[in-house]
Image (cartoon, grey):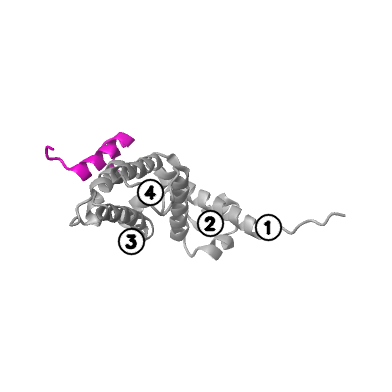
Amino acid sequence: MVKKSPPDATRRSERSRRAIYDAALALVAEVGYPRTTIEGIAARAGVGKQTIYRWWPSKAEVLLEAFLDLGEQAARQAGHQPHEIPDTGDVAADLKAVLRATVDELLDPRFDAPSRALAAEGLVDERLGREFVARLLEPQLQLYVRRLRAAQRAGQVRPDVDPRIALELFVSPLAQRWLQHTGPISHAYTDTLVDYALYGLAPR
């Protein structure tokens, strides 16, 4: 008689965690943040409420972690390390590459609808907004800061430039277009933002 191996609890937990991520992102896109509940996420994921509360204290924590995971998956699919902007020695090419990947992510329905719902709710729920910035937005912006500082050390960016302000020259216009639908977003658009930010508007 062949003895059966015991169930792999780690694998089962990972499947449940993945199902919860998917359910949370889908629900917030469909019904909005206020109407998304732990009960709804649990039902959609096919798990018990206690499973969710064992890992997260609130729906905000579930959604923020699901978003972090989604961003990491998108970075890997684009061939990037999730927590670093590539440094090939060409700062313009590196910024264009990561912004192109960002455009692809923003145009992905899996990302677009839930992130819009969370961004909108963050404007009226100050606590959620602060958490959204601290856990999701600011860590991503710091990747640009580190890459621009490396470019300063390489003499590709002026040493007196504040990287935290400089990154807003190409990140903020993209975010505005995407959030407010003020124009289309594309690879060509973000390439142009990088060129304008790095080389300015004055005649050369």
Q: Which residue is mark 1?
A: 8
The foreground one among 22 and 126 is 22
Image coordinates of residue 5 in percent, x first then y, are 76, 57
Label 3 or label 4, whichever comes before in sequence order: 4
Tag 4: amino acid: Pro
3D distance between C-alphas at marks 3 and 4: 28 Å
Q: Residue at x 34, y 62 (%)?
A: 127
Question: Camera-side residue: 142 or 22?
Answer: 142
Residue on which the image places disc 4: 86
Mark 2 sits on what residue? Answer: 39
Q: Does the magenta run of residues contain 56?
A: no
Q: Mark 1 or mark 4, which is nearer the start of the sequence?
A: 1
Q: Amino acid at mark 1?
A: Asp
- Seen in the picture, residue 135 relative to 90 is either above or below; the reply is below
Magenta stretch in the rendered image = 180-204
Foreground residue, 154 or 76? 154
Mark 1 surroundings within 10 Å by alpha-carbon count, few (fewer than 14), some (14 through 19), many (20 or more): few
Q: What is the spatial separation of the Cα atoms under label 2 and label 4, in whole angstroms?
A: 40 Å
Residue at the extreme right of the image, as rendered: 1
Q: Nearer the viewer, mark 2 or mark 4?
A: 4
Give the CA distance from mark 4 to mark 1: 36 Å
Residue bearing the label numbered 3:
130
Do residues under tags 3 and 4 come within 8 Å of each other at their CB atoms?
Answer: no
